[in-house]
């Protein structure tokens, strides 16, 4: 039977059946067992006489390494780095204190887990296994990383693409450069007005990179002006195209979710409108008029023509997209497989611009792609030194210097201009000759939005400055809101208090939990009250607007502080005031979130709408109309794709969204087994992503140890991409 090892071999792996394995190992699923079994059986069937199958110890270790590969891939890693398991006890129940777990020490036999040998021994075992039937490539070993064949191929494809891009400067020659120079001279004074001060204008550098290189990446936090820059890059590109040829150019824009695509459209159009207001009749206005009809961002699934179940894109290496310029937003949300499919469908001549925030949570699926592609650590080091020779190649810097004379003068150690190469420069270039250069990358670091306190919180998180972070919280408002509220028990009083404008940008609810590990009722009442305005809206469009005002964000979906439980609790609180609310049923004012893409209805995973009764008293699901701001589309429930109640939502789900105010709720019990940290658990990236969703004000509902735990841990994804790029 498929997947079933002969009993003699199965016994040597340590388990005679799947249930046997699941009984011994915590957190291992049937899929892991069958993955490992299948890899072994494929080789056993081809070479049963191989000594490896008589070596019980090695076979046992190998079987568990394969379990680990499947396990780590399920957690979003592209591969298994064996250092993560070497000499460790894995999947032992005794080590795991998952908050909200139903596990009870009293009534269960502890799962013992498995002890791995040293990295050197594991490496030897894997190598011997890899030598059996080398033509089989379902498993690929690239020491110290073990891959499933599929992920190894995806990673190789992405690495090849970006390595090739390095050599593809589009304007290394005349007359292409002349056209860019003309753009810089004629257009940029309008698009990038000169600023006081000596700093390099990184927005302008991003636009220059976007024009010079075939592929470029703009990474920056919320409000750092990524869209501002891309709007100007598009205008610059169109300007250069018009100079070069009279043919119609084709622009495409996409993002991982419908919501993010819609936001990209809105933000670019807002930038164009602003530019039009001050440039009514010049060439900028003409360029905008030409570009406007092309600003039609869609989801990547739709762009590639990926079917309902995510397979067989219509556009691929054989049939490529019909475009000259592709812009992709929210790239941190894109997984390795999707990126590989995207690159396959991109024509060789097309330009690609990727926008995102490398510090945000990586994709829910596999890979930490954006982080691997931008090499932020080297960048920050270069920024401190003011010397970008380690990240930009000499030829690239020369082009930048020609286009942006300010780049040379502001680059303190990099004092060269187009005609003058200092010794330092040449030397540093020589040192870096063999290195992969990140010519395609620009970081935008300065927030252009007003709330400096939120930016400062985000900054402290990224730098791992837990003391400064806590200092900001403490000085902002120490628990005063909760303690004041203790004295004002009635809902009416609460309502009065909450409709007052926000007085504080940051609020910290440090001690918000009951003994039972749930939220204190007084805080729940306060949170529920923030949603009351949805029910009080005069019409559905106002209710939809209210949905953008406030959101409770939680780290997890499950457990007593997970979104599922919180949603029912908030609902109960609201029911005290709005008696028509019927838990488990649809009701007027109920906020809902789509959890499955529906291309027919143009409703996408993460879209948020509200249940509203029409004039006949019939309940309909209403979502904002992406084409006509301020209006909505109404759907019957029968036609709707899968959806769920959404007062609280997970931080993961909020990627690509912003709200005027957010409250971030962290678990009050810390998961203490570092090895099993996953993107779902506490991490610096999780907190950063949550904090940067807030536009006006933010509430932090977390104990100091939970916050420190978050800030100290980064959610690294195992991947070989960076190594493949630079080797
Ligand atoms: N150089 C600038 N001068 C003036 N205003 C700017 C500048 N850069 C950005 N802004 C403004 O700052 C605001 C935020 O910019 P933008 O929306 O481009 O940021 P973003 O990085 O795309 O943010 P998000 O990730 O939240 O979408 C916008 O209103 C934009 O017009």
Image (cartoon, rainbow, N blue to C red):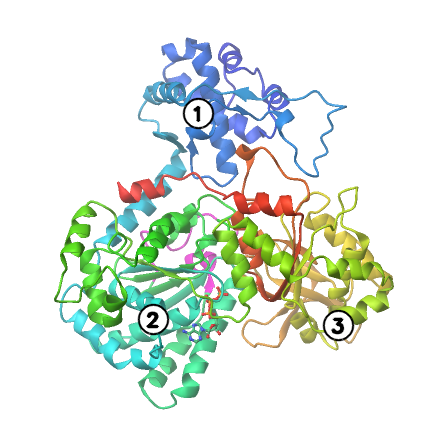
Q: Earlier in the sequence, mark 1 or mark 3?
A: 1
Looking at the image, the residue that sits furthest to the bottom is 281
Graded by Cα atoms within 10 Å as few (under 14), some (14 to 19) or many (20 or more), the crowding at tag 1 reads some
Give me the C-alpha separation between circle 3 and circle 2.
42 Å
Residue 199 x/y as whole percent: 34, 69
Residue 406: numbered disc: none
Residue drawn at the location 38% of the way across and 64% of the way down: 327
Cα gap from disc 1 to disc 2, whole angstroms:
48 Å
If the image is split into quadrants, where does the C terminus sit?
Answer: top left
Q: Residues within 10 Å of mark 3 (few under 14, many from 20)?
A: few
Q: Residue at x 33, y 75 (%)?
A: 235
Number of on-image labels:
3
Asked whether residue 307 is drawn in magenta, I would say: yes
Left or right of 378, for residue 313: right
| Percent of width and height locating residue 148 | 41, 33
Which callout, 3 or 2, points at the residue further toward the start of the chain?
2
Q: Nearer the viewer, residue 190 or 669?
A: 669
Left or right: 287, with 617 as reference point: left
| Contact, mark 1 vs mark 2 (Cβ under 8 Å) | no
The answer to whether residue 344 is left or right of residue 164 is right
Q: Quadrant of residue 528?
A: bottom right
Mark 2 highlights which residue?
Answer: 233
- The residue that disc 3 covers is 499
| Label 2: element kind | helix
Q: In this image, 283 relative to 643: left or right?
A: left
Count residues near mark 2 (Cα–Cα under 10 Å), then give few for <14, some for 14-19, many for 20+. many
Mark 1, residue position: 39
């Amino acid at each position: 039977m498929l997947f079933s090892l002969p009993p003699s071999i199965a016994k040597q792996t340590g388990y005679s059946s799947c249930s046997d394995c699941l009984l011994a190992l915590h957190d291992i699923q049937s899929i892991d067992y069958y993955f490992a079994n299948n890899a072994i059986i494929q080789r056993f069937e081809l070479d049963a006489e191989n000594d490896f199958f008589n070596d019980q110890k090695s076979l046992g270790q190998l079987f568990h390494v394969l379990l680990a590969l499947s396990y780590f891939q399920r957690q979003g890693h592209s591969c298994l780095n064996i250092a993560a398991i070497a000499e460790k006890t894995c999947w032992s129940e005794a080590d795991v204190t998952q908050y909200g777990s139903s596990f009870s020490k009293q009534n269960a036999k502890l799962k013992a887990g498995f002890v791995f040998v040293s990295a050197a021994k594991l490496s030897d075992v894997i190598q011997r296994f890899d030598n059996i039937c080398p033509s089989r490539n379902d498993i690929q070993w690239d020491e110290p990383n073990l891959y499933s064949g599929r992920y190894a191929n995806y990673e190789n494809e992405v690495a090849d693409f970006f390595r090739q891009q390095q050599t593809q400067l589009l304007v290394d020659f005349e007359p292409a450069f002349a056209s860019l120079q003309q753009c810089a001279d004629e257009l940029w004074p309008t698009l990038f007005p000169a600023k006081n001060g000596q700093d390099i204008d990184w927005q302008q550098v991003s636009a220059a990179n976007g024009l010079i290189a075939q592929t470029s990446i703009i990474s920056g936090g919320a409000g750092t002006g990524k869209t501002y820059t891309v709007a100007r890059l598009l205008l610059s590109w169109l300007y250069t195209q018009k100079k070069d040829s009279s043919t119609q150019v084709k622009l495409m824009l996409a993002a991982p979710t419908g919501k993010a695509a819609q936001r990209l459209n809105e933000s670019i159009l807002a930038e164009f409108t602003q530019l039009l207001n001050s440039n009514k009749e010049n060439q900028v206005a003409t360029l905008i008029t030409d570009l406007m009809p092309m600003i039609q961002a869609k989801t990547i699934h739709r762009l590639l023509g990926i079917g309902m179940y995510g397979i067989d894109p219509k556009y691929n290496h054989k049939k490529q997209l019909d475009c000259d310029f592709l812009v992709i937003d929210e790239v941190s949300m894109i997984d390795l497989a999707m990126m590989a499919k995207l690159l396959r469908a991109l024509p060789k001549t097309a330009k690609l611009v990727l926008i995102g925030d490398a510090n945000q949570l990586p994709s829910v699926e596999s890979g930490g792609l954006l982080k691997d592609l931008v090499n932020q650590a080297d960048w920050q080091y270069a920024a401190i030194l003011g010397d970008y020779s380690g990240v930009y190649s000499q030829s690239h810097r020369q082009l930048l210097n020609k286009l942006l004379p300010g780049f040379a003068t502001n680059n303190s150690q990099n004092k060269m201009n187009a005609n003058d190469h200092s010794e330092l420069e040449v030397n540093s270039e020589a040192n870096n000759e063999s290195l992969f250069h990140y010519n395609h990358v620009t970081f935008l670091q300065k927030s252009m939005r007003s709330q400096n306190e939120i930016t400062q919180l985000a900054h402290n998180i990224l730098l791992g400055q837990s003391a400064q972070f806590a200092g900001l919280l403490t000085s902002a408002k120490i628990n005063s809101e909760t303690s004041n509220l203790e004295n004002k028990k009635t809902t009416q009083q609460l309502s009065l208090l909450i409709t007052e404008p926000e007085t504080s940008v940051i609020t910290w609810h440090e001690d918000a939990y009951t003994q039972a590990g749930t939220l204190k009722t007084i805080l729940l009442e306060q949170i529920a009250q923030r949603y009351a305005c949805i029910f009080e809206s005069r019409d559905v469009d106002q209710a939809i607007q209210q949905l953008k005002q406030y959101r409770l964000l939680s780290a997890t979906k499950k457990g007593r502080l997970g979104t599922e439980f919180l949603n029912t609790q908030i609902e109960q609180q609201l029911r005290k005031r709005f008696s028509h609310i019927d838990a488990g049923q649809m009701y007027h004012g109920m906020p809902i979130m789509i959890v499955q893409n529906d291309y027919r209805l143009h409703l996408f995973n993460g879209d948020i709408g509200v249940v509203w009764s029409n004039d006949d008293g019939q309940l309909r699901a209403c979502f904002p109309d992406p084409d006509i701001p301020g209006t909505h589309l109404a759907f019957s429930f029968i036609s709707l794709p899968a959806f769920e109640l959404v007062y609280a939502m997970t931080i993961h789900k909020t990627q690509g969204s912003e709200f005027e105010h957010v409250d971030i709720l962290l678990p009050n019990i810390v998961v203490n087994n570092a090895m099993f940290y996953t993107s779902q658990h506490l991490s610096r990236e999780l907190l950063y992503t949550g904090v940067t969703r807030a536009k006006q004000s933010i509430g932090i509902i977390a104990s100091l140890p939970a916050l420190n735990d978050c800030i100290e841990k980064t959610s690294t994804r195992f991947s070989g991409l960076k190594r493949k790029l630079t080797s």
